[in-house]
C-alpha cells in the first residue's frame, strides 16, 4: 500500500514544487506585517482583500508576529516558505535581518516584495514606499503652515514631537522637514523632543514643550502615539485654539481630537491603497507582468521603479473636519 | 554620618526631592508655578498607587512583574465596555476595574501560595498572558477618545480643591496604606511574613496566605490604575504602559523597600515614586538629551540599591548568620 502511494505522493509534491503558480490554482500572496493588531496594517489587509477580489484568483494570507521584532518575522516567513506561497509582501521590522530568509524564499521561486518599511535590495525584487521621504517631510511642514492659517496668524513657532531618537524613518522625515522649512518663512522651528512612542512620555514631553515655549503655535508629531498624546495634552492644558497638533496619524484614532479643536488637520498615506497596491504588484510579479522599470498597480496607476527597484505610491492624504468622520469608520 | 542619613531615609529623600525641584526651578522658573507642580504630582499619581501595591508584594519577599500588563488589560476591558455601553455609570466601571484587577492578582497569588511557584516566574508568565489577552479581546483595535463617554474621560481631570481627582485618589490610597500598615493586623503581617517567615509561621501567620493577599491588593490597584491610565491618555491599545512595571519596582527600591523583604515604609515608597515622577517631569523641561534621560534614571536606581544594601548590613537579624559563618570559616581554611 505504502509502496504504491509513495511514488504518487512524491510526484504530486514535485509538481507542486515545480509549478507553484499554476494558472488554474489561486495565486497565494502572503501579506507579512510588522505585528498583528495594528490598525494601519488591518486596513492594508482590507486593501489587499479588495485587490484579491478584483483580480479573481488570488488568496491573501494575512500574517505577522505578535510583537514588532525581526526574529518573529523570520519565523513567520520560514513557515510561509514551507507552505510554498507564490509571493511574500512584507513590511519589515529590520531592513537587513530579513535578507537571508527572504533570499531563501526567492531561491525557492517565491516572489518577494517589501512595502511600507523596506528590505535591502538583495532580499526583494520590488519595494513600494507609501510615499517618498521628501513628500512626507514637505507634507508635515505644509500641515504646520495650514495650522497657522487655521489659527489666523501670519507667523508662528513650531516644534516636533518624534518617537525614539534612534527611529530611522522619523529621523529621515525630520531631516526632510528641515530641508523645506526655508520655503515657509512664516514658520519658526524651535525644538525637537522624543516621546519614545510611549503615551505617558509623549504626554510629558508635549506638556514640557508648551511650558518651555509659551508662544508655541504648532506641534508636529509624525507618529501615531505621539500625535494622540500631544492632542490630549493640549486639551488637558486648556490650550485648544492656541496650540494646534498635526502630523501623521490614523483617522479613527484622531477623529475625537479634530472634533475637540486640538487638531486642524493631519495626514497619512491611505493604508487601504497601500495594501491594494502591494498585492497588485506581487500578483503581477507572479504573473510575469512586470518590466525592469515599471509595474502596474491597478487603480493606483503604474509604479515607476528606480535602479534599486523602489517605487513611491502617492503623497500622503490630508484629513480634516470635512472627511475624518468618513474615514474613521474604515481605519 | 552616612548611617544617620539612612536612618532618616524619608527625610533624606524628601530633601533630595525638594532640592531637585529647586534646582530645576532655578534653571526653568516656570517649573515652580503651582500649575506645573500640581501637574507633575498628578502625573505621578498612577506610579504612586502602583508602587503601594508593589510594596506589599516586595515586603513578603515576592515581586509582581505583571502590574503593567494587568493595568493594560483591565484598562482595555473597561474602555471597551465604555465604548460599547456608554450608559454604564463610571463609578461602577471603576469598581469593576478594581474587582477584575484583584482577580488577575489572585491568579498570581494562587500560583505562589498554593502551587508554590516562585513569584518572579509566575508574574513573568502572567505578564505575557495578560498582554496577549488584550490582543485577543481587542483584535488589536484601539479604543479611541471619541469612542469613550464624556464622563469616562473627565472624571480623573475634574478639579476638586485645586487638584485633579486623580491626584486625590493617589493621596487617599497612600493615606489608607499608611494607616493599614501601622494599625491593622494584616498590615503588620506583610512585614512579619517577609522579615522572618519562620517566626511568622510560629506566631500563627500563614505566610503563603499573606503573599496571596499582597498579590490581590497589588492587582486591585493595578485595575484601578487601568481605568485611570486609559482615561488620562484617552486611548487603550495593546502596548499601554509597556515596561511600566520596572518604573514601579524602581520607585519601591528608591523608596527603601528592601528586595529581601520585610523592610520598608509607606512614606518612603511614596517618596520614591515622587522622586521618579519629579525626574520624569523635570528632564523634558530641562531639555536634557533623551539618551541622558535613560542613563540618569538608571543611575538613580543603582545608587538607591547600593544605599539599601549598606543600610541592611547592620540589621539585627543577620547576627545569627554571622555567627554561623564565623564557625564555618576556620574549617574552610583548614580545607584550603
Image (tube, rainbow, N blue to C red):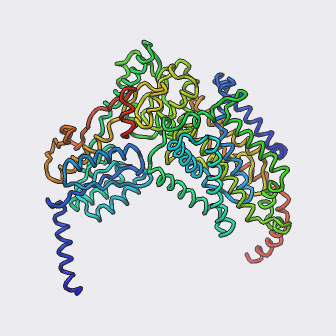
**Which residue is located at x 24 percent, y 85 percent?**
A2
User: Would residue A66 appear left or right of A281 to someone viewing this image?
Assistant: right
**Which residue is located at x 51 percent, y 31 percent?**
A230
Quarter occupied by the N terminus of chain B: top right
| Quadrant of res B284 | top right
**As drawn, B223 above or below A134:** below
Q: Measured from the top left, where is residue A68 in percent x and y?
A: 43, 50
User: Would residue A266 appear left or right of B168 to someone viewing this image?
Assistant: left
Q: Measured from the top left, where is residue A328 in percent x and y?
A: 39, 36
Q: Measured from the top left, where is residue A312 in percent x and y?
A: 26, 37
Q: Nearer the viewer, residue B172 or A149?
A: B172
Q: Measured from the top left, where is residue B34 in percent x and y?
A: 69, 24
Q: Which residue is situated farthest in the front direction here?
A: B87
Q: Nearer the viewer, residue A316 or B94?
A: B94
Q: Nearer the viewer, residue A55 or A104?
A: A55
**Which residue is located at x 31 percent, y 41 percent?**
A272
Tell me if I can see residue B295 in this picture.
no
Tell me if I can see residue B196 in this picture.
yes
Q: Which residue is situated farthest in the top direction here?
A: A154
**As drawn, A86 above or below A163:** below
| Quadrant of res B279 | top right
Quarter occupied by the C terminus of chain B: bottom right
**As drawn, A173 above or below A113:** above
Amino acid at each position: 500500500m505504502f509502496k504504491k502511494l509513495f511514488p504518487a505522493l512524491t510526484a504530486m509534491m514535485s509538481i507542486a514544487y515545480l509549478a507553484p503558480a499554476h494558472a488554474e490554482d489561486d495565486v497565494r500572496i502572503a501579506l507579512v506585517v510588522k505585528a498583528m493588531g495594528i490598525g494601519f496594517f488591518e486596513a492594508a489587509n482590507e486593501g489587499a482583500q479588495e485587490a484579491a477580489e478584483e483580480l479573481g484568483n488570488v488568496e491573501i494570507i494575512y500574517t505577522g508576529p505578535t510583537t514588532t521584532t525581526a526574529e518573529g518575522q523570520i519565523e513567520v516567513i520560514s513557515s510561509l516558505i514551507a507552505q510554498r506561497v507564490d509571493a511574500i509582501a512584507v513590511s519589515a521590522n529590520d531592513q537587513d535581518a530579513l535578507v537571508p530568509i527572504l533570499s531563501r524564499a526567492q531561491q525557492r521561486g517565491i516572489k518577494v516584495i517589501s512595502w511600507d518599511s523596506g528590505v535591502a535590495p538583495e532580499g526583494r525584487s520590488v519595494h513600494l514606499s507609501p510615499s517618498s521621504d521628501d513628500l512626507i517631510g514637505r507634507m508635515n511642514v505644509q500641515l504646520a503652515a495650514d495650522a497657522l492659517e487655521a489659527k489666523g496668524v501670519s507667523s508662528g513657532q513650531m516644534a516636533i514631537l518624534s518617537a525614539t531618537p534612534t527611529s530611522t524613518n522619523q529621523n529621515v522625515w525630520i531631516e526632510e522637514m528641515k530641508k523645506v522649512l526655508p520655503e515657509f518663512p512664516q514658520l519658526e522651528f524651535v525644538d525637537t523632543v522624543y516621546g519614545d512612542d510611549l503615551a505617558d512620555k509623549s504626554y510629558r514631553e508635549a506638556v514640557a514643550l508648551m511650558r518651555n515655549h509659551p508662544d508655541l503655535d504648532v506641534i508636529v508629531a509624525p507618529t501615531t502615539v505621539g500625535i494622540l498624546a500631544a492632542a490630549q495634552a493640549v486639551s488637558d492644558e486648556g490650550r485648544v485654539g492656541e496650540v494646534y497638533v498635526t502630523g501623521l496619524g490614523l483617522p479613527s484614532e484622531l477623529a475625537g481630537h479634530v472634533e475637540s479643536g486640538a487638531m486642524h488637520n493631519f495626514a497619512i498615506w491611505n493604508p487601504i491603497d497601500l495594501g491594494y497596491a502591494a498585492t497588485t504588484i506581487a500578483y503581477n510579479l507572479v504573473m510575469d507582468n512586470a518590466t525592469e522599470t515599471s509595474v502596474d498597480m491597478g487603480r493606483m496607476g503604474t509604479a515607476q521603479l528606480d535602479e534599486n527597484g523602489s517605487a513611491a505610491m502617492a503623497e500622503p492624504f490630508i484629513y480634516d473636519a470635512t472627511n475624518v468622520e468618513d474615514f474613521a469608520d474604515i481605519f | 554620618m552616612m548611617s544617620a542619613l539612612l536612618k532618616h531615609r524619608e527625610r533624606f529623600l524628601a530633601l533630595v526631592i525638594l532640592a531637585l525641584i529647586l534646582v530645576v526651578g532655578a534653571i526653568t522658573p516656570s517649573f515652580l508655578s503651582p500649575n506645573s507642580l500640581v501637574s507633575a504630582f498628578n502625573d505621578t499619581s498612577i506610579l504612586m498607587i502602583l508602587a503601594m501595591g508593589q510594596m506589599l508584594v516586595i515586603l513578603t519577599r515576592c515581586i509582581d512583574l505583571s502590574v503593567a500588563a494587568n493595568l493594560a488589560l483591565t484598562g482595555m476591558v473597561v474602555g471597551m465596555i465604555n465604548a460599547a455601553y456608554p450608559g454604564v455609570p463610571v463609578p461602577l466601571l471603576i469598581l469593576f476595574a478594581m474587582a477584575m484587577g484583584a482577580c488577575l492578582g489572585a491568579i498570581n497569588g494562587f500560583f505562589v501560595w498554593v502551587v508554590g511557584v516562585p513569584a518572579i516566574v509566575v508574574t513573568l508568565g502572567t505578564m505575557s498572558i495578560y498582554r496577549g489577552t488584550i490582543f485577543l479581546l481587542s483584535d488589536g483595535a484601539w479604543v479611541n477618545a471619541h469612542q469613550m463617554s464624556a464622563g469616562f474621560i473627565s472624571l480623573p481631570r475634574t478639579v476638586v480643591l485645586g487638584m485633579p481627582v486623580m491626584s486625590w485618589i493617589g493621596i487617599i490610597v497612600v493615606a489608607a496604606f499608611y494607616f493599614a500598615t501601622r494599625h491593622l493586623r494584616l498590615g503588620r503581617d506583610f512585614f512579619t511574613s517577609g522579615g522572618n517567615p519562620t517566626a511568622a509561621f510560629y506566631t500563627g501567620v500563614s505566610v503563603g496566605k499573606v503573599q496571596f493577599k499582597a498579590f490581590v491588593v497589588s492587582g486591585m490597584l493595578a485595575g484601578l490604575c487601568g481605568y485611570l491610565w486609559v482615561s488620562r491618555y484617552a486611548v487603550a491599545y495593546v502596548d499601554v504602559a509597556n515596561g511600566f512595571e520596572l518604573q514601579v519596582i524602581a520607585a519601591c527600591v528608591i523608596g527603601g523597600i528592601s528586595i529581601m523583604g520585610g523592610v520598608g515604609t509607606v512614606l518612603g515608597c511614596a517618596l520614591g515614586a515622587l522622586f521618579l515622577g519629579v525626574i520624569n517631569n523635570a528632564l523634558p523641561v530641562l531639555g536634557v538629551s533623551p539618551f541622558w534621560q535613560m542613563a540618569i534614571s538608571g543611575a538613580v536606581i543603582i545608587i538607591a540599591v547600593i544605599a539599601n544594601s549598606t543600610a541592611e548590613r547592620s540589621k539585627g537579624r543577620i547576627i545569627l548568620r554571622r555567627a554561623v559563618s564565623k564557625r564555618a570559616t576556620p574549617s574552610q581554611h583548614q580545607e584550603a
